[in-house]
Amino acid sequence: MQRRAFVQLLGGGVILGPGLGGCTQAMPAEAIAAWAEAGRDDAANADPRRWALGHAVLAPHSHNLQSWLVDLSRPGEIELRCDLTRLLPETDPWSRQIMMSQGTFIELLEIALRERGQRAEVQLFPEGPPGPRQLDARPVARLRVTPDAAVPKDPLFATIKRRHTNRLAYAPQRRIGADAWQAMAAAAAAAVQPQAQPLAFGHVDAAQPELLARHRALANEAWRIELETPRTFLESLKVMRVGAAEVAKYRDGLTLLDPMVVALDKLGLFDRSKAPPPDSFAVRSQIKDFAQKMDSTAAFLWLTSEGNERATQVNAGRAYARVQLAATAAGLVMQPLSQALQEYPEMAAPYAEVHRLLGAAPPRQTVQMWARIGHAPSAGPAPRRGLQAHLRG
């Protein structure tokens, strides 16, 4: 949200006096404690599975919902299930992005296990996969973990705690070197498991200005549609945590610490129970702000798959996690652009366009990830619920 002395929000008007403004609130320390605690050696982390899981909970997740449930009741095993209360039925109706978010968790978990001298045998959907339209309570993955001093460590482990999704403006004049692109492509390829459907990595940068402009325009159009569709905007509002107190309480969802919005919320003028009208300041200002960030973006990358089975979605998430870690190692930042990849009726035209733009022909091929990438100041870590919140059994 843009800050102004006169703010018209959610279709209504209000003037905020100087005492209600001020500096942006700081991220509460307890909301990001999991980032500092990961890798700590103490009695609670004597089990290498718990030590590794402390890193896995730092994985990226759609809307930062952190829908991971973990069972450690069987020695030498880690069972992962999806928390079915943490889904996105409006923007991700078939839960493709939720499955990718299970994959990011698995990838960071396996990388961390290797760092601890543990070999993991990953079995996806040991009791069978869910159907294409609805998830169920069966396990997403079962990992058999055994000590192995010879297991090779992954150099990407060093970047896990430095990896942050960055939604700020980027530095448009700074190019990404060929070595960095090659490292990201290699990272994606390394995530593909035996007998898995192949994934293709691609990118565009300022060397192709006309194509770059098409990417920016498509990202803007998809963002506009999501904000102007009441039920999809409302889905984001429902998981928006406004102010330091809410962020510290929930430690998930979308963080908003802007003092103007916090003040409006305290006055009961920021209604998160209904979506603002398309012509409201809340919508128009976010569309304008997003367009400015797209204008600052000098490169995009993507991952496409053959097919779109549940296992393919999970493996795409694993690949994306590795790509982002490799980008972090190269001093780069990223932000997923999920809107055009979402499968609800109002997004049908951008969905078809992004597949044409990236040379993917559905249903045989699927664009699993599309993201902006570049150089930018650190955005800092996002809130995390902590390992204990994910343990079951």
Image (cartoon, helix red, strand yellow):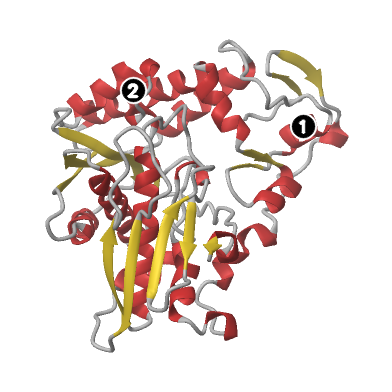
Image spot of residue 90 (x, y percent): 47, 27
Kind of residue at badge 2: Ala
- Nearest the eye: 30 or 195: 195
Image spot of residue 306 (x, y percent): 14, 40
Kind of residue at badge 1: Asp
Left or right: 254 in relation to 207: right
- Give the secondary structure at mark 2: helix
- Foreground disc of the pair 2, 1: 1
The answer to whether one can see residue 75 in this image is yes
- Nearest the eye: 71 or 319: 71
Q: Residue at x 58, y 85 (%)?
A: 42
Please name the residue that numbered disc 1 is placed on: 265
For the view shown, which residue lies furthest in the front direction? 127
Q: Residue at x 22, y 26 (%)?
A: 210
Using the image, determine if residue 212 lies above or below residue 26.
above
- Nearest the eye: 167 or 353: 353
Mark 2 or 1, nearer chain start: 2
Using the image, determine if residue 57 lies above or below residue 269.
below
Please name the residue that numbered disc 2 is placed on: 217
Using the image, determine if residue 195 lies above or below residue 282.
below
Q: Residue at x 50, y 24 (%)?
A: 232
- Give the secondary structure at mark 1: helix
Left or right: 86 in relation to 339: right
Left or right: 386 in relation to 212: right
Total labels: the figure holds 2
Distance of mark 2 from mark 1, alpha carbons? 33 Å
Image spot of residue 59 (x, y percent): 44, 57
Q: Quadrant of the N terminus?
A: top right
